[in-house]
Image (spheres, rainbow, N blue to C red):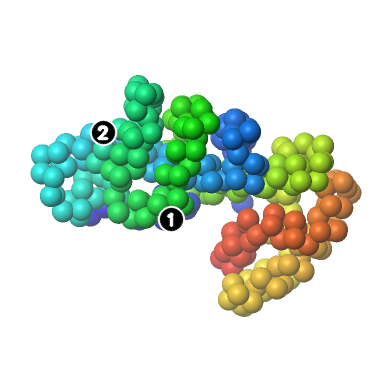
Amino acid sequence: MAKERITDVVMDDASINVSKEVDLVFSIANSLRGAYKSDKYKDVIIPMIIIRRFECALANTKDAVVAAFEAKRDVPPQILEKVAGYKFYNTSRYTLAELLNDSDNIVSNFKSYIEGFSANVQSIIHNLDFEKEIDKMDKNNRLLGVVRKFSELDLNPTTVDGIKAGYMFEEIMLSVIIEEINTIYGSKGDTGVRTKAAMQIRDILLKDARLRASAKNNPFSDFKFTYKDSVSDALVAGYDENVDFYTLLLGNEELRDKITEVYMKEVYESLRGGK
């Protein structure tokens, strides 16, 4: 029987350092400048993280899965899941690293690689409309570089567990949002510093007794209202350390919500579970 579900691998309170991984992914986002507006970086970053995460998880059993599939093309998915050790698999011989060996055909090969994933993974990627982004990156001479950098990113569940992956994903999303804010408002605020400041809001919220009580006693749909009030309180509590950025957020509800909604679900689940 496959040992892990698909959600256990994608994202599964000690201090968790994800700066190395976040810096690498953000350098990739910066490489998209010109071809993409900052608010569209996520159209590339999110699906590439998903693909690389699954690829790393499947690395140890990939050859065995490919061999089983090529020996019997109509092999039942359940058998491939058993060989893979997960509730998903990939039957393609390609990996991100292997795609680099044939740069002239990287577009078609990349799409073929995606088609090699099991139906549940393909559904995630297709819902993100990622094939369109593959074509766009290729047209703007970005695809090869993006694939190369992601092929070097360690997202193996044995070294980057679900908790660390979750923190990393949050920081990446916050970095992209804050870069967008800096562009729109012509701000010179350092993206890395502001990302850390945004994460500090989450840390303050996780210590909020009123918010903890709301999480334990209410469904998520009701918790949201208390959460929004608590965000304002958290900004006031941490104001002296992040004056310029928190002033911007206190004066703009749309930006405040956009940033703090990134980790709202995590805060709810952490407080509800008593972490």
User: Is residue 210 left or right of 116 when viewed as pictured?
Assistant: right
> Which picture quadrant has residue 157?
top left
Say which residue label 1 marks.
127
Q: Residue at x 64, y 41 (%)?
A: 37
Three-letter amino acid code at disc 2? Arg
Three-letter amino acid code at disc 1? Asn
**Count of numbered circles in the view:** 2
Q: CA distance from mark 1 to mark 2?
A: 23 Å
Q: Are marks 1 and 2 in contact (CB under 8 Å)?
A: no
User: Is residue 200 left or right of 21 when viewed as pictured?
Assistant: right
The N terminus sits in image quarter: bottom left
Where residue 216 sits: x, y (%)? 61, 73
Question: Of helix, strand and loop, which one carries label 1?
Answer: helix
Q: Residues within 10 Å of mark 2 (few under 14, many from 20)?
A: some
Q: Residue at x 20, y 53 (%)?
A: 77
Q: Residue at x 38, y 43 (%)?
A: 54
Where residue 191 sits: x, y (%)? 73, 38
Q: Residue at x 64, y 77 (%)?
A: 222
Vertical placement of residue 3 versus 254, above or below: above
- The reply to whether residue 82 is visible in this rendering is no
The C terminus sits in image quarter: bottom right
Residue at the extreme front of the image, as rendered: 139
Q: Nearer the viewer, residue 204 or 64?
A: 64
Question: Of helix, strand and loop, which one carries label 2?
Answer: loop
User: Is residue 82 left or right of 107 when viewed as pictured?
Assistant: left
- The reply to whether residue 140 is visible in this rendering is yes
Q: Which mark is on residue 93?
A: 2
Vertical placement of residue 262 versus 143, above or below: below
Where residue 74 sits: x, y (%)? 13, 49
Please identify, in this view, whether the residue under mark 1 or under mark 2 is nearer the observer.
1
